[in-house]
Amino acid sequence: MTRRALIAALAAASALAVVPTAVAGGLAEMRDAHGRLAASAGPGGAYATLQDGGWALRFDSASRTARGVSLTGVSLAGGLVYAERIYVPAHGLRGARVEGLTVNGRAVAARPNTLVPLGAASYLVVLQEAVVPGEGSGIVGLRLVAGDSSLGLDAGSQLLVGLARAALPPSDHRHARLSWLALGVTGHGADTGSDDLGLPATQLLGLPTGGSVGARAVRIAIQYLGTPYLWGGADPIMGFDCSGLTMYVYAQLGIRLTHYTGSQFYEGTRVPPWALQPGDLVFFEPSSRGPQHEGMYIGGGRFIQAPHTGDVVKISSLSEPSYAFGFVGAVRPFGAGAGA
């Protein structure tokens, strides 16, 4: 196909993709920061949806059977992420596979729950359990989360590729699970994919590889990426608020913290910004009652946090203006003076 013909094909496909399909359960979807469906692709030929001069989501072909869904030639964020083939069975992970996965030109072994950073606040998760409101649960082949606009996507948007949804969950669990935002790592431990990229984990997520208390805290915390924010929440089923997340993580390491940000600011050893280590708690939003927001430093100038209602546990950068200007201080809860 000539370049002119390819551009014409992409433009035609994107014109169809601007309006969300009326049929729920597309094989690939784009959702905005509020979870609303922005574009959806079904079975058929080539598909593309354009964003800021490039394509957000594109594939060569897709099909659906009673056994599962299959896509070929899948490209995300203008080619930053590419997979030769994705197959997701209708039920469970058995047989699920993502073949020929590359990120920024580097091969990644696509194991379930593999987590690959795509910048300061964006990331890709491979073969992850998901729940979509009113449409059921199942496995997503690839899930790209745009934490900012650096990928050419609107901040907060998500691309979900390879959706094979099973039956709806029981009604008594819907209040906790039927948020499309509840697309978190399922608790089996996130794989950062660093070995496959040929780079140390610290260059990707700032994740430590040692056995220190802080390193272990970070590895626990990233298992809950994607868990919905819930004010007063302190568990991965119902959700987390900012201090609930840090309290829950450190409780698993035998360190007791109060479920209040203003108190946690005093539950440990004060740490200057230049001495931050993975696992340190970073605090923001000064007030007469002490800082009102916090997160856990993971390295590389990044931290994991449960931001606010309508958002999810995610990775952010300390250099973002709202955090840089609102920074109050940091505490090491496993140092001298920490509860244990």
Image: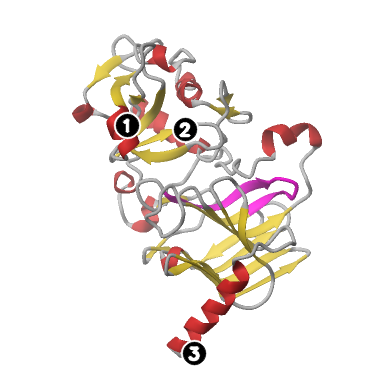
Q: Quadrant of residue 61?
A: bottom right
Number of numbered discs on residues: 3
Give me the residue at 22% from left, 28% from top. Answer: 273
- The amino acid pointed to by label 1 is Pro
Q: Earlier in the sequence, mark 3 or mark 2?
A: 3
Residue 1 disc label: 3
- In this rendered view, identify the residue nearer to me: 8 or 118: 8
56 on left or right of 263? right
Q: Quadrant of residue 131?
A: top right
- Quick one: quadrant of the C terminus? top left
Q: Earlier in the sequence, mark 1 or mark 3?
A: 3
- Residue 96 in sight here: no
Residue 22 disc label: none
Measure the alpha-carbon separation of dots 3 and 2.
46 Å
- Closer mark to the observer between disc 1 and disc 3: 3
Q: Position of residue 74 (x, y in %)?
A: 53, 69
Magenta: predominant secondary structure element? strand
Q: Earlier in the sequence, mark 2 or mark 1?
A: 1
281 on left or right of 221? left
Badge 2 marks a residue whose secondary structure is: loop
Local crowd size for mark 1, using a 10 Å CA cut-off: few (<14), some (14–19), many (≥20): many
Measure the alpha-carbon separation of dots 2 and 1.
19 Å
- Closer mark to the observer between disc 2 and disc 1: 2
Report the magenta residues as a range.
122-139
Give me the residue at 34% from left, 18% from top. Answer: 334
Residue 307 disc label: 2
- In this rendered view, identify the residue nearer to me: 287 or 144: 287
- The amino acid pointed to by label 2 is Pro
User: Residue beneath label 1, please?
Assistant: 278
- Residue 132 in sight here: yes
Q: Position of residue 301 (x, y in %)?
A: 28, 38
